[in-house]
Image (cartoon, rainbow, N blue to C red):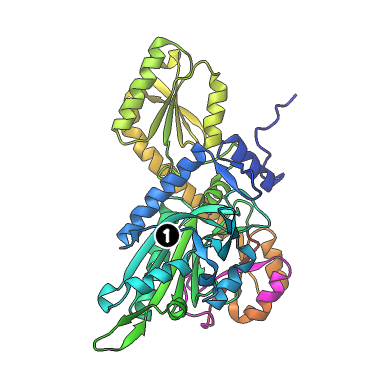
Amino acid sequence: MAKAPVLTPQAEDFPRWYQDLINKAELADNGPVRGTMVIRPYGYGLWERMQQEMDARIKKAGAQNAYFPMFIPQSYLTKEAEHVEGFAPELAVVTHGGGKQLEEPVVVRPTSETIINEYFSKWVQSHRDLPLLINQWANVVRWELRPRIFLRTTEFLWQEGHTAHATYEDARDYASMIHTQVYGDFMTNVLGIDVVLGRKTAKERFAGAINTLTLEGMMGDGKALQMGTSHELGQNFAKAFNTTYQLQGAEREYVWQTSWGVSTRMVGGLIMSHGDDNGLRVPPRLAAVQAVVLAIKGDDAVIAKVREIGAQLEAAGIRVVVDDRTDTPFGRRAVDWELKGVPLRIEVGPRDLENGTAMLARRIPGGKEPVSIDALAALLPGVLEEDQALLLRQSRERREARTVDVKTLDEAVEAAATGWGRIAWADLGAEGEAKLAEQGVTVRCIIAADGSVPQADDQDGNIAIVARAY
C-alpha cells in the first residue's frame, strides 16, 4: 500500500497544500481570536531575516527607525476624508478602558499616516528640517473578513516608512527609490521572486495617495500577490495636519509626503512562490539555517565528526545547525528539515566516515551526491549561490510561461484562470477594469510597453497586468 504524502499535493488542492505546509513545517498557528496568528520560532526566524535584510536597505536609504503609539485618537483619522473612508470597514475601535467609557474612542493602528503626521507637523518648521525620513517596525490591526495565515490576518507585522519633502519631485523620486532599490532589490536578490514593478490604477491606489507603486509576484498556482507598496501622498495629509515648512522670509509651504510598507505577507509569498510537494524551499541568502549537518547514527565518531563539520562551515560563514539527535529516527529528521526548506543537508554515517565523504542533499534542485568532507567548507558557498540563482530563474520562467497577451475582456478572464494577462490599458480602461472585478479579476498594476514603471496611468502604450489575486 502506497504511503500517504506528508502534504496535500499542490495540483490537487493548492490552498490545502499551503495550510498543510504551514502546519507541518511549524511556521504558524491560528490565534485564539479569529483572524490572528501565532508565529512559531521557525516562521519567525524567516521574518527576522527579512527584517534584517530590509532594515539595512532602509537605513542605507537614509531613514531612521522610530516608534509611534498603536492607539490613535479617532478624530485623527477623520481629518483626511479619503483615508478614513478607505479604512473604515477594517477598523478596530476601543470605546472602553479602565472600566470606563472613553471620552474619545481610539482606533487600534491600521496604518500610521495620521498619528505620524500629527508629530511631523510639530517637528517640521524650516526647510532645514527636510527631508524627514522615518521608518517604524510595528504591528497593525485591520479587521479581516476572510483571514488566511500570513496573507490576510487581523493583526500582522510590518514596517511602514513615512517621509516629508520640500518638493513634489523629491517625494516622487524617494518613493520610486524605495520601490526599486529597497523593495525590488530585496525581493529579487534575497527572496528570489521575480516581481513585476508597476503602478496601481486609480481604483487600486492606497486611500489618500496620489500614486501607488506596487510589486506583484506570481505564486505557484498562477495567482498574483501584492508583495509591497510605495505611495506618493502628495500634500493631502500635510494639508489635513497643517504640516508646513518656512521658506526664506515668512512664506510657508506644505510638505510633500510618501509612505511605504511590506509585511509578514512576504512569508506567505515565499511559501507559495518556492514551495513544492515536499515542503518549503528557502532561498539561501534569506535562510536562517543554510545547512544542517545530520548524524545518521549515534556513533561517537560520527557525532564528533558532524560537530567538527558544523564548526568548519560556521567558520566559512555558513549559517549552520548540527543535528545529532540520534534518539529520533534519521528518516523523520531528514523529512522535517526538507519540510522546512533548509537549502543543504550534509548527512554523515559510519560508512561515510570510512570513505572520508558526506552525502550532500540539495533541497532546491533536489538530488544527493557524495562529497569529500574536506572539500565541504570550500564547496558549499558556491553551491548556495547556484541554488539562489536557480530559484529566481524558476520564478521568472513560471511568470513568463503563464503570462499571455490578450485583447478582450473575455480573453483576460480566461488568462487569469491559470496565470496573468497583459492587455493594453487603452483597450481596457476604468470601465473594463470594473467589469473584470465583477468576475474576480483585478488589474494588479500598469507597466510601460518596455516593462518599466510609467509616470502616469494614461500614457500611450501602457499595459495592464490582470490576474486573480490573494
Which is nearer the eye, 359 or 74? 74
Q: Residue furthest front?
A: 100
Residue 336 appears in which quarter of the rendering? top right
Residue located at (56% from left, 42% from top): 38
* Position of residue 441 measured from the top left corner of the image (x, y, whole percent): 68, 66
Residue 66 appears in which quarter of the rendering? bottom left
443 within the magenta span:
yes
Residue located at (42% from left, 36% from top): 290
Q: Amino acid at mark 1?
A: Phe
Residue 381 appears in which quarter of the rendering? top left
Rendered-image quadrant of the N terminus: top right
Q: Residue furthest top?
A: 300
Residue located at (56% from left, 46% from top): 271
Whether 370 is drawn above or below 142: the answer is above
Please provide the residue range marked out in magenta. Answer: 433-460
Circle 1: element type: loop
Residue, disc 1: 68
* Position of residue 378 measured from the top left corner of the image (x, y, whole percent): 31, 33
Within-10-Å neighbours for mark 1: few <14, some 14–19, many 20+: some
Which is nearer the eye, 34 or 14? 34
Answer whether residue 217 is visible to the viewer in this image. Answer: yes
335 within the magenta span:
no
